[in-house]
Amino acid sequence: METHRVGIILNGVTGRMGGNQHLERSIVAIRKQGGVRVGTTDVIMPEPILVGRNADKLKALSDKFGGIAFSTDLAALLKDKKYPVYFDAQTTSLREDSVGKAIAAGKHIYCEKPTATTAAGAIELARKAEKAGVKNGVVQDKLWLPGVRKLKYLIDTGFFGKILSVRGEFGYWVFTGENSERPAQRPSWNYRSEDAGGIIVDMLCHWRYLVDNLFGNVNAVSCLGATHIPQRVDENGKVYKCTADDSAYATLTTDQGIVCHVNSSWCVRVRRDDLLTLQVDGTEGSAVAGLRECRVQHESMTPRPVWNPDIDSPINHFDNWPLMPTHQPYDNAFKVQWELFLRHIVLNEPFRWSLREAAKGVQLAELAIDSWKQRRWLDVPGLK
Ligand SMILES: NC(=O)c1ccc[n+]([C@@H]2O[C@H](COP(=O)([O-])OP(=O)(O)OC[C@H]3O[C@@H](n4cnc5c(N)ncnc54)[C@H](O)[C@@H]3O)[C@@H](O)[C@H]2O)c1
């Protein structure tokens, strides 16, 4: 049995995503399961070191997870050959600069989205990584959600016939923080454009890779953004002005002629199957995927509604939508992608979720904002 150890600098682990999804549910979980098994003999074992500004917070995390190494000296770690991989889940505004420095230091890169705050910055980062010859990957977690994998199965097996349209509903109520009994459940920078906040920058990256991978390459966008809630209360109890969009109503078209409309909002209350639902309608059937489940209605089971508001509906529209079976256990989506990235690092297996692919998400977000400001449809050109 050979163990391939991969030293990884984990930056941003004191935050929500870095701490929960990447450290606890991915890297620690992989270590707990004994690493990533490769064939019958080998194992890939991530060897993380936590990095950040606050030694006390890092120590608390280190203690919680059995004494993981930690440091506040990122510059020294970037020179340390023991750690060939740099991971970044810091707040968005820091990503481009930090990842750029890690590339310059010769590190392989894995990081959260968005990779930059402008399309030009995101493309430049991809170009730098390619020129330096470092391996690189960006989180595209939604592709490994059980609900989305079930939806992909339906697409691949031709369940829908011709796919006509997709309706995405994402969002939930994020408390404003004004009532101390209901603290905000997202960081305040999300609501300030000067800190690279905003739901368009945040979510359109996800919609880009989801649509590209499932429904064809996005070729045009029309988007209306809004800041529905003008002020909120931050982590220190201070009132601040919301300068970024908290809702986005976006329509995308693809080169397969599919119309995808996605509403994203932190100002909606949920009366649907899940925090994200994707309804796909096709000539032969429809499906509604949530985070874990997917419901289907075949053409043969489709009721024939007739509009008549004078009587109670004779049809319960929630009937006749059976759940797809779950045939296999689904691991955490972030962990699945981490395992693929580790295999890419050690075994050179292909990994197509690169900085270049991620730049497409930033490009779409930027065009969506332009479309909103200009009040018109914009084409989404291929990346040079
Ligand atoms: N893939 C997904 O589904 C998903 C979901 C949410 C957020 N994200 C992305 O993850 C990133 C982090 O989001 P989050 O919600 O965890 O944010 P967060 O505010 O909880 O965490 C931000 C991290 O950055 C660090 N940081 C903040 N300011 C810093 C500074 N000046 N210098 C150094 N470090 C600093 C913080 O200490 C913390 O570790 C964002 O880019 C966001 O877009 C991805």
Image: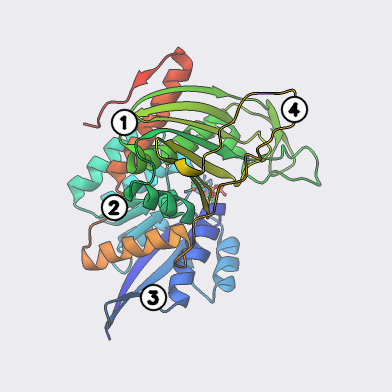
State the residue position of label 3.
35
The x and y percentages for residue 205 are: 42, 38
CA neighbours of label 1 inside 10 A, class few (<14), some (14 to 19), many (20+):
few
> Nearer the observer, disc 4 or disc 1?
4
The x and y percentages for residue 10 are: 43, 60
> Nearer the observer, disc 3 or disc 2?
3
Count of labels shown?
A: 4
Quarter of image, res 186: top right
CA gap between label 4 and label 2 equals: 59 Å
CA gap between label 1 and label 3 equals: 37 Å
**Sequence order check, earlier mark of 4 and 1:** 1
The disc labelled 1 sits on which kind of residue?
Ala
Disc 3 + disc 4, Cβ < 8 Å? no
Q: In this view of the protein, which residue sits in the foreground, 165 or 307?
A: 307
State the residue position of label 2.
136
Residue 71 in view (yes/no): no
Identify the image quadrant of the C terminus: top left
Residue shown at the point (62%, 39%) measured from the top left: 317
Quarter of image, res 173: top right
**Sequence order check, earlier mark of 1 and 3:** 3
Quarter of image, res 55: bottom right
CA neighbours of label 4 inside 10 A, class few (<14), some (14 to 19), many (20+):
few
Label 4: which secondary element: loop
Disc 1 + disc 2, Cβ < 8 Å? no
Q: Is residue 196 left or right of residue 341?
A: right
Q: Is residue 232 left or right of residue 59?
A: right
The disc labelled 4 sits on which kind of residue?
Ile
The x and y percentages for residue 315 are: 65, 37
Q: Is residue 220 left or right of residue 352?
A: right
State the residue position of label 1.
120
